Amino acid sequence: MKRTGGDVDEFIAAVTPAKRQRDAATMVALMREVTGREPELWGTIVGFGSCHYRYPTGTEGDAPIAAFSPRRQATTVYLLDTGAHADELANLGPHDTGAGCLYIKDLDAVDVEVLRGVVAADYDRVVSGDTGSASFTVTG
């Protein structure tokens, strides 16, 4: 994955539907606060910071440290492992999960403080290198 550049504000202004656009603006503010970093576009993903990852299988690449994408069906928040946040996510409110994705259809329906804690904990894991068998090196 690579940074693609572009204006994050313009990207968010073009997001539809309106609810997803509102949620994207909220996510930018939340992730900016949690990470202390400015948002950058990685295609249709809004990322904060960057890292290089390497798995024991040899798979490696670059990715944002914290990221989300305002998809049409839901806001997708990218995490290392949603299972690591099971207790917190039980208190989040309506959402779905995949192995490394948290899907939220409406930020107004969830506890944003719980979400903030999950994003912060995941960000801290990458920055501290406490990521299990994979290695992550902060690059920006």
Image (cartoon, helix red, strand yellow):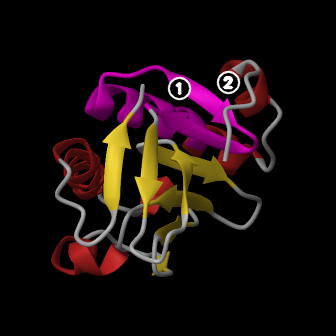
Q: Is residue 28 above or below residue 63?
A: above
Label 1: which secondary element: strand
Q: Position of residue 82 (x, y in %)?
A: 35, 74
Numbered circle sitting on residue 39: 1
Q: Report the disc number at residue 8.
A: 2
Q: Residue at x 48, y 40 (%)?
A: 27
Q: Is residue 39 magenta?
A: yes
Q: Secondary structure at mark 2?
A: helix
Closer-to-camera residue (101/126): 126
> How far apart are labels 1 and 2 at the CA level?
7 Å
Q: Point out the stretch of residues depicted in magenta.
A: 24-49
Query: Looking at this view, is 26 or 101 the one in front?
Result: 101
Q: Position of residue 83 (x, y in %)?
A: 29, 81
Q: Position of residue 121 (x, y in %)?
A: 20, 53
Q: Quadrant of the C terminus?
A: top left
Q: Is 16 inside the magenta-drawn segment?
A: no
- Disc marking residue 64: none
* Residue at x 83% of width, y 33% of height: 14
Left or right for 13, reference 117: right
User: Cβ–Cβ below 8 Å for labels 1 and 2?
Assistant: yes
Relative vertical location of residue 64 with respect to residue 89 in this rendering, above or below: above
Give amino acid for label 2: Val
Residue at 41% over, 30% down: 139
